Amino acid sequence: MSQGFETRAIHAGQEPDPTTGAVVPPIYQVSTYKQDGVGGLRGGYEYSRSGNPTRTALEECLAAIEGGSRGLAFASGLAAEDTLLRTILRPGDHAVIPDDAYGGTYRLFSRVQQPWGIEHTSAALSDVSAVAAAIRPGKTKVVWVETPTNPLLNIADIAALADVAHAAGALLVVDNTFASPYLQQPLALGADVVVHSTTKYLGGHSDVVGGALVVADADLAEQLAYHQNAMGAVAGPFDSWLVLRGIKTLGVRLERHCDNAEKVVALLQSHPSVSTVLYPGLPEHPGHDIAARQMSRFGGMVSFRVVGGVQAALDVCSRTKLFTLGESLGGVESLIEHPGRMTHASVAGSPLEVPDDLVRLSVGIETCADLLADLAAALS
């Protein structure tokens, strides 16, 4: 019988230690392993870049909660993305990316991949026909999806885009960081690869930087594992242990994140200082119906535009007390930021530039009445 999400999150890859019975996987803070004769490896471990038992536990758990054949853990989300792109793309290949992609992803394509001959086209991923039009037959090898997107919270139809990508012989890659595997299962909807910044909801406590890939196809998994070892940007044992610890409570945390976000959205909608609220849970959101179909709930990320323009937005960011001004997202504490000058400064002046009156919230799990009072005071 298939086990539930929370059961997999707590137990997958995490059997009690056979030596001591410890119920939490040990932190194997080790670089190398004694061999029983030349080439006689215990459990296949020889050097911790190539494999580490704590990282193995995390990778098995990631595969289980995303429904993939294999998970791979990296030193950061961008390290995971870079390894993936250098595995599946060659000079002359082409990718389609979101027209409101995460700034770091856009920088990776435009400043790192492009000089090596990898071309890309930005398209509105909420418009399936626009994605199809952006594909270059015979050249497009990847359609890269964020849903919800960062920071505009647009929604892409994963199943429809999988059909478009596969018809063109391309892989569909989904950055599932904002939704997390608790709220959305891209592989079940037809995606080939799922990308995570495990720094965010999977870690959940703003105390670790990491990334992950989860894949459906075993052959692709082997290629990625080879490049993971050859390129070396692997998750360390302590970082792996921290992410594993975070995953255990992912389900209960996400429920609280979603509860609080819905109440924050209601406040923002009624406040005269707010011109627009961006949240896929709103019936008027253009992607609401698709989000309702492919997500179990709508997440803890909320963006809004402020009456009065950029200075008013900056003022709101400077006035909050509980919402900490900072980059990143997905931790237990609430964060506020100005994307145009912070997380998305790298796309300023590009087609992916975000509105300068936009504020992004990562709604945490604090007492919601306190969060609402903090936001109301900052907006007033």
Image (cartoon, rainbow, N blue to C red):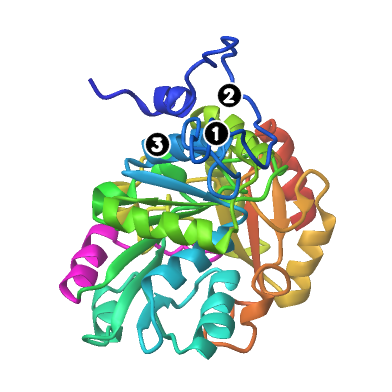
Q: Are marks 1 and 2 in contact (CB under 8 Å)?
A: yes
Which quarter of the picture shows residue 119? bottom left
Question: What residue do we see at 58% from left, 24% from top?
Answer: 25
Q: Which residue is mark 3?
A: 65
| Distance (Cα) linking label 1 and label 3 | 19 Å
| Badge 2 density bin: few <14, some 14–19, many ≥20, Cα 10 Å | many
| Mark positioned earlier in the residue sequence (1 or 2) | 2
Q: Viewer-nearest of labels 1 and 3?
A: 1
Name the outermost residue toward the left.
167
Q: Secondary structure at mark 2?
A: loop
- Asked if 117 appears above or below 370 in the picture, the reply is below
Query: The disc labelled 1 sits on which kind of residue?
Result: Pro
Question: What residue do we see at 62% from left, 89% from top?
Answer: 349
Q: Which residue is mark 1?
A: 53
On the image, the x and y values in percent for residue 191 come to: 29, 57
Q: Secondary structure at mark 3?
A: helix
Can residue 18 be seen at all in this image of the molecule?
yes
Question: What residue do we see at 78% from left, 74% from top?
Answer: 311
Q: Secondary structure at mark 1?
A: helix
Which of 179/29 is in front? Answer: 29
| Mark positioned earlier in the residue sequence (3 or 2) | 2
Q: Viewer-nearest of labels 1 and 2?
A: 1
Which of 21/37 is in front? Answer: 37
On the image, the x and y values in percent for residue 280 come to: 43, 55
| Distance (Cα) linking label 1 and label 2 | 9 Å
| Mark positioned earlier in the residue sequence (1 or 3) | 1
| Distance (Cα) linking label 3 and label 2 | 17 Å
The magenta segment: 149-168
Q: Mark on residue 25?
A: 2
Q: Please give left or right for residue 195 compared with residue 248 in the image.
A: left
From the image, which quarter does the C terminus lie in? bottom right
